Image (cartoon, rainbow, N blue to C red):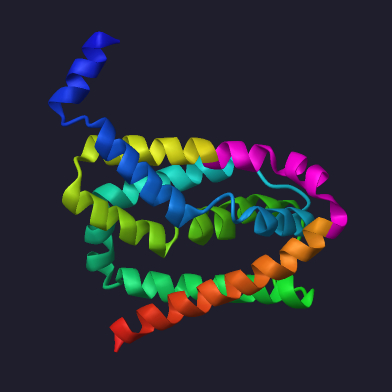
Amino acid sequence: MQHFLAILWNYGLSFKEIGVASMVLFAVIDIVGNIPLIIALREKTGQIYPLRTASVSLLILVGFLFVGESILGLIGVGINEFAVAGSFVLFFMALEMILGIEIFRDNGEGTTKVASVVPLAFPMIAGAGTMTSLISLRAEFELVNILIAILLNIVVVWIVLKLTTTFEKIIGATGIAILKKVFGIILLAIAIKLFSSNIRELF
């Protein structure tokens, strides 16, 4: 263990940087604030897969941290395009929560597994905001500290997803219905802000 820590220190391990990076990512991901959205998605698909969602989110974030900008530059797509695309997904999900309509249709078992990737892993967890934050953090902090911060946040995501049923029991059906409307409006506002703040960069 000491040998492992010594190696990390050589790579610039800093508990201060880990703490700051973790708090930044936690605020951007906002997994606790997204509990009503997770509950709504689980009711629609019948089931979510916490480990699958957490694993895919981890792969997306770590992959983007290393090669994201290069890949996006190679195919001619930027963070702003990702943000605008993600805003449309969030917009329609917000309409579902507010109006009680069905836009994303459940086509069976395949859909429940896909829902763990889209929209849970992307764009809710590993969305454009998180990716943009990673770029900013990469410019200031050592890589090892950002990686640890990502891992810590993914563990939190996994725990929250695992305990969604418990939260649902505590809140109750009426509480969930109210939270869906409230967070639907908040999600709609986030989608509009995400769209408006990034669409300007495209033109």
| The N terminus sits in image quarter | top left
User: Which residue is drawn at the image coordinates 22% and 59% (left, top)?
Assistant: 70
| Horizontal and vertical percent position of residue 38 | 67, 54
| The C terminus sits in image quarter | bottom left
Left or right: residue 162 compared with residue 132? right
Asked whether residue 150 appears in the rendered view, the answer is yes
Q: Is residue 162 magenta?
A: yes
| Horizontal and vertical percent position of residue 77 | 30, 72
| Horizontal and vertical percent position of residue 55 | 50, 40
User: Which residue is drawn at the image coordinates 66% and 59% (left, top)?
Assistant: 37
- Say above or below: 151 vs 196: above
Q: Residue furthest left?
A: 10
- Please tell me which residue lies in front, 32 or 132: 32
- Say above or below: 16 vs 198: above
| Horizontal and vertical percent position of residue 15 | 27, 31
Left or right: residue 24 compared with residue 73? right
The quadrant in which residue 196 appears is: bottom left
Left or right: residue 155 compared with residue 72? right
Q: Residue furthest right?
A: 173
Kindly report the secondary structure that dominates the magenta region of the rendered protein.
helix
- Say above or below: 61 vs 184: above
- Say above or below: 38 vs 191: above
Left or right: residue 81 compared with residue 87? left
User: Which residue is drawn at the image coordinates 79% and 57% (left, top)?
Assistant: 176
Asked whether residue 51 appears in the rendered view, the answer is no
User: What span is in magenta?
Assistant: 157-174
